[in-house]
Amino acid sequence: MLGTLIWRVREATAVLLGRKKTQKELPKQNFSEKNLTNLKPFKINDEKLNQFLSGLSIEFIFSEFNEERVNAGGADLSQQLRLDPSLSTLKKYFPNAKYTVYSDFDLKIEGINLKKIENPVLQDKKNLKRHFYHLADYYKFKGMLESEADIAISIDSDMYVLNDNVYSLIYLTEKFGFCVPNSSAQSMNFEIETSLDTIPITDESKGFGTTSNITPMTLSKKSEVGKIFYQNCCEIMEKEPSRASIVMWKAAWKTGNYPYLLPKEFCVCRGNEGLGNEVILHVGHPSVAQFYNVRLQ
């Protein structure tokens, strides 16, 4: 799109002339090294929390299409188990949860329920450059709708759960019905101007709706509004595949319903390093892994 091209030329020119840096200078940190070799199960000492979790069934849903693992954030995760670091760090805090992966190939991981999709949707749109991303996002929505768990959580495989504040995600979902994380972007206009795989917003908001991230997304089995929202996400993705945040906005505009926006602490992305009170790190962004001293290899 012309607007995106103009914005990127301006940004590149500012960097070349020294008026702007490619990313903000981050303060020096001294975080202890984090990796998957020294994870230990977390023991819950809060009896109220124990009772709350024991009364719920929880399912984490992954969506992995294309046997070659490609990370849009730029991290090299080729040496990791396909669902790590998300899977291992989630299991530390949710050892009794159900774990399911939707995939178009035989992704066999011990303890994981594989839902192999023999005939994925969007086969008539395979020529689109980000076809596998569209598929993955579609089955993130679909997976939550098909879940029989009390709480369904769709999450990317390049996340690192940092601490037990992740249990707040369950409480928030139980309270509000369905949740998505806040985004580093601003309005949908900014998202369209600066992101890949976007299409215009043509509704009366003129692009001034709020954008959101897509990992983690949650759904309570009790939330009929949430089910309608995610069902519309699926239908819109089938008709007009694009970036998931745009699909979600279109679903929100169509239904008049919007998920509860989780704070950025639940999806710390590039540019949000050092915000404080971090819960889940998006370590698929190399600068995030480096800042928090997360070893991925």
Image (cartoon, rainbow, N blue to C red):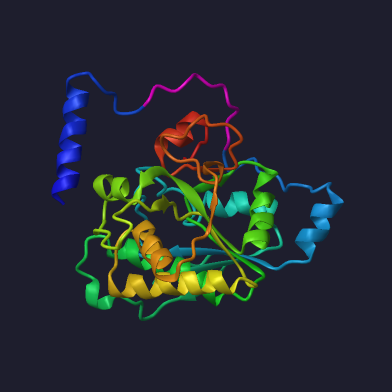
Residue 292 shows in the view: yes
Judged by its main secondary structure, the magenta piece is loop
The single residue placed furthest to the front in the displayed view is 204
Taking the image as shown, residue 9 lies to the left or right of residue 246, namely left
Q: Which is nearer the eye, 211 or 83?
A: 211
Q: Residue at x 62, y 53 (%)?
A: 90
- Residue at 29% in and 49% down: 189
Residue 4 location, quadrant: top left
The tally of labels here is: 0
Note whether 64 is above or below 121 in the view shown: above
**x, y percentage for residue 84?**
51, 52
Residue 26 at x, y percent in the picture = 44, 23
Task: Residue 30: say if magenta.
Answer: yes
Q: Residue furthest bottom?
A: 119
Magenta span of residues: 24-34
Residue 105 shows in the view: no
Which residue: 22% across, 18% down? 18
